[in-house]
Image (cartoon, helix red, strand yellow):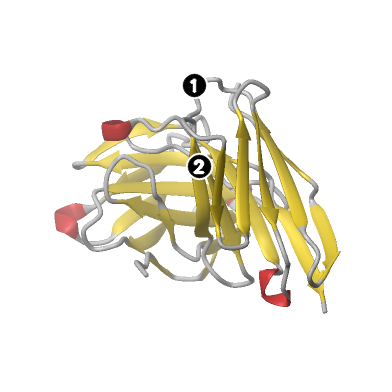
Amino acid sequence: GEQVEQLPSILRVQEGSSASINCSYEDSASNYFPWYKQEPGENPKLIIDIRSNMERKQIQELIVLLDKKAKRFSLHITDTQPGDSAMYFCAASEDYGSSGNKLIFGIGTLLSVKP
Amino acid sequence: GPKVLQIPSHQIIDMGQMVTLNCDPVSNHLYFYWYKQILGQQMEFLVNFYNGKVMEKSKLFKDQFSVERPDGSYFTLKIQPTALEDSAVYFCASSLRGGPEVFFGKGTRLTVV
């Protein structure tokens, strides 16, 4: 299968707390897992990604974890700010190299950070 | 950062008519994609395109759909004829190589009435 499940669909947190979004995938050939942030009226923007040769990656307040055995990956935003409020999409793909990168997306999580 | 431009942002069309969605990908990118997002659902892969050819298409890429990029101009998605179920937001994307980083446009909201 090629499904990517994403939970929760809506997440409300207080400013300064952390937010976690969880995704699971079915295709064991998946080896690339990007996260996109989409603000209203804007394009989805890549914020962080992880390849299957890593278990953890951090860029500033963003942490992604990958558990290949369980076929799960997650995004953690520490010290959330109102500017983090947006839709977040996880995705999985088998990086085909010369054949192109077909992304399978989760349904999205609407994160709302209250001041 | 690199930008993918999509024109128009909204399009309303009568069922059965033809529509062409235009995408101006990042200038040095070589791989181009279309994704479809129905309201409340995830973005779903339609097709990818490289070197003038469709590399892969999903079951959502019906016979009424076609893509092309004539002479390095816009990368287009044409639907002929349109059906009510084609109403969705269509996102264009591009990447420099086959992977991994893919850049998305803002989408074209297509409404078929």
Q: Under tag 1, what secondary structure?
A: loop
Q: Where is the N terminus of chain A found, in terms of image quarters?
A: top right
Image check: A108 left or right of B58?
Answer: right
On the question of residue A52 being in view, the answer is yes
Residue B17 place in picture, x, y as percent: 47, 55
Residue B58 place in picture, x, y as percent: 47, 32
From the viewer's perspective, is residue A7 above or below residue B17?
Answer: above
**Looking at this rendering, what residue extends furthest in the left direction?**
B71
Residue type beneath disc 2? Ile
Residue carrying label 1? A29
State the residue at coordinates (35%, 53%). Answer: B94
Residue B4 place in picture, x, y as percent: 37, 64
State the residue at coordinates (63%, 20%). Answer: A69
Q: Where is the C terminus of chain A found, in terms of image quarters?
A: bottom right
From the viewer's perspective, is residue B66 above or below residue B24?
Answer: above
Q: Which label lies toward us, 2 or 1?
A: 2
What is the chain identity of the residue bearing mark 1? A
From the viewer's perspective, is residue B50 above or below residue A3?
Answer: below
Image check: A7 left or right of B6?
Answer: right
State the residue at coordinates (38%, 43%). Answer: B100
Residue carrying label 2? A50
Kindly check if marks 2 and 1 are in contact, taking CB atoms under 8 A apart as contact: no
